[in-house]
Image: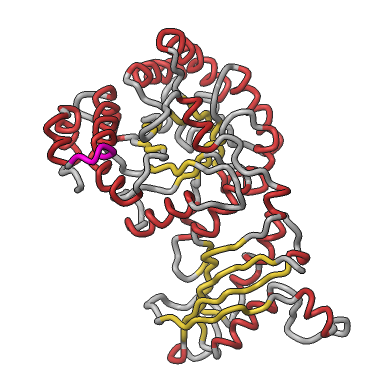
């Protein structure tokens, strides 16, 4: 029996919906604008994408994509499920994308088209191993066997000298943080190249580990040209580093999969640039679809954003992203959802109530560095709040028992319940 990939889209069109769905299916498989000589019925039966389901939806307020044809007053919207034979592209992420997210965004019959979900068959997991460490491996390396893993981002995001960075890391390690990461803006620039950062940071972490038995995980950003990724990875690992960070959209999903083939430590998957392919309701790829490919490619940690964030996503969208990353996928090792963007201790209770798990990496940049009591108090406020939430205590109980959390409200406002 032929295996298939199921791709779900949301489309808008002035054509009859069934006709628009057929145009989409044909353009992304066997079709062209006219039937050609060798396009036999047998060939179409074997290789043409098929419309599995078409469900009409209310029309939104978004304007049409440029170049759209048809009468705007006749516009209708629908969810469309297409079934693509795996034989069309094989278990290859780049070639899958050519089918499910290729020229379809340019079809003039569609006033809007967004890939919102995927269902992938087992052969993809036979080719791509997915995360090598995931939740369990990250907990083991950070020494945080239970509870939310608390992390932070180097701030200021760029501009610190390697010596300044080492001092900051020492303070954060002493404060009990589990995880520290380079900002995505900090790559391999001449003011603080990767080699200099590794040489400055790792002795600090090793000394802390010698004293305490715990080495916080530092995610060095190894994002670079593809031919430099392995050397960057080896530089970190050979110095004793326990994590590398990759900006997935910078190196591409195939680049992420390539790193995963040689990685000996967890891959922290940053989604920088994701808004460019997802933010528009008219065109692009939704997180629920994209995250499957990032996990398949080997992201041990994957950014989902967090509630009350500083970016465009609503709480409902963020919670759906966290649920998507936590959902089983082809028996792969579970990826760690990474909550970030505007996070602070006062969001712990609301987040935990919504997601019901502490198998999370919660990153607070300003929420730790900007605490009025300093970074150590910032870490303490995060730890206290998440532990309180996990115990089932109320926000008021948490505020009574944690001075660090009370002080955090002086800067960040009221705790969310």
Residue 111 lies left or right of residue 344; in this view the side is right
Assess whether residue 292 is covered by the magenta stretch. Answer: no
| Nearest the eye: 263 or 13 | 263
Q: Which residues are magenta?
A: 389-393
User: Measuring 76% from the left and 86% from the top, which residue is drawn there?
Assistant: 34
State the residue at coordinates (34%, 34%): 365
- Tally the numbered discs: 0
Image coloring type = secondary structure
Answer whether residue 390 is magenta in the image.
yes
Q: Is residue 87 above or below residue 214?
A: below
Figure check: 15 above or below 271 = below
Q: Position of residue 79 (x, y in %)?
A: 50, 76
Q: Quadrant of residue 319?
A: bottom left
Q: Measured from the top left, where is residue 407 in percent x and y?
A: 15, 31
Closer-to-camera residue (191/42) = 42
Residue 40 is situated, as x and y percent measured from the top left of the image, at: 85, 84
Q: Choose top left, top right, bottom left or bottom right for residue 157.
A: top left
Residue 350: percent from the left, percent from the top? 26, 48
Q: Quadrant of residue 384?
A: top left
> Among all residues in the image, which is located at the extreme right?
38
State left or right for residue 269 relative to residue 296.
left
Which quarter of the figure is the N terminus placed in? bottom right
Query: Could you tell me which residue is drawn at 69 percent across and 67 percent down?
Result: 4
Q: Does residue 195 appear to the left or right of 356 in the view shown?
A: right
Main SS category, magenta section:
helix
Residue at x 71%, y 35% (from the top left corner): 227
Position of 238 compared to 178: left or right? right
């Amino acid at each position: 029996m032929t295996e298939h990939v199921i791709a779900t889209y949301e489309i808008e069109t002035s054509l009859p919906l069934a006709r628009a769905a057929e145009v989409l299916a044909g353009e992304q498989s066997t079709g062209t604008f006219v039937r050609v000589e060798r396009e036999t019925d047998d060939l179409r039966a074997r290789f043409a994408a098929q419309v599995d389901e078409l469900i009409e939806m209310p029309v939104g307020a978004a304007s049409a994509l440029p170049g759209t044809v048809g009468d705007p007053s006749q516009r209708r919207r629908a969810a469309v499920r297409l079934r693509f034979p795996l034989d069309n592209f094989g278990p290859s992420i780049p070639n899958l994308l050519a089918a499910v997210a290729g020229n379809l965004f340019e079809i003039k019959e569609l006033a809007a088209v967004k890939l919102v979900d995927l269902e992938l068959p087992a052969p993809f997991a036979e080719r791509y191993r997915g995360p090598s460490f995931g939740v369990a491996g990250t907990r083991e390396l950070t020494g945080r066997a239970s509870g939310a893993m608390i992390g932070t981002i180097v701030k200021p995001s760029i501009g610190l000298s390697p010596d300044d960075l080492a001092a900051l890391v020492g303070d954060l390690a002493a404060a009990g943080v589990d995880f520290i990461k380079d900002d995505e803006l900090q790559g391999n620039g001449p003011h603080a190249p990767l080699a200099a950062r590794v040489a400055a940071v790792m002795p600090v972490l090793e000394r802390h580990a010698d004293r305490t038995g715990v080495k916080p995980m530092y995610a060095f950003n190894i994002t670079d040209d593809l031919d430099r990724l392995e050397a960057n990875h080896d530089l970190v690992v050979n110095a004793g580093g326990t994590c590398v960070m990759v900006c997935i959209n910078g190196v591409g999903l195939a680049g992420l999969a390539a790193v995963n083939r040689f990685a000996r430590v967890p891959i922290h998957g940053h989604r920088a640039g994701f808004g460019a392919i997802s933010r528009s309701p008219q065109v692009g790829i939704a997180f629920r679809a994209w995250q499957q490919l990032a996990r398949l490619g080997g992201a041990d940690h994957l950014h989902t954003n967090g509630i009350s964030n500083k970016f465009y996503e609503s709480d409902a969208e963020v919670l759906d992203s966290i649920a998507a990353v936590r959902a089983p996928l082809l028996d792969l090792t579970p990826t760690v959802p990474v909550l970030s963007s505007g996070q602070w201790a006062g969001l712990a209770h609301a987040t935990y109530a919504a997601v019901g798990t502490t198998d999370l990496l919660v990153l607070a940049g300003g929420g730790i560095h900007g605490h009025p009591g300093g970074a150590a108090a910032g870490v303490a406020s995060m730890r206290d709040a998440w532990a309180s939430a996990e115990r089932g205590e109320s926000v008021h109980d948490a505020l009574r028992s944690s001075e660090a959390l009370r002080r955090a409200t002086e800067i960040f406002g009221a705790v969310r319940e």
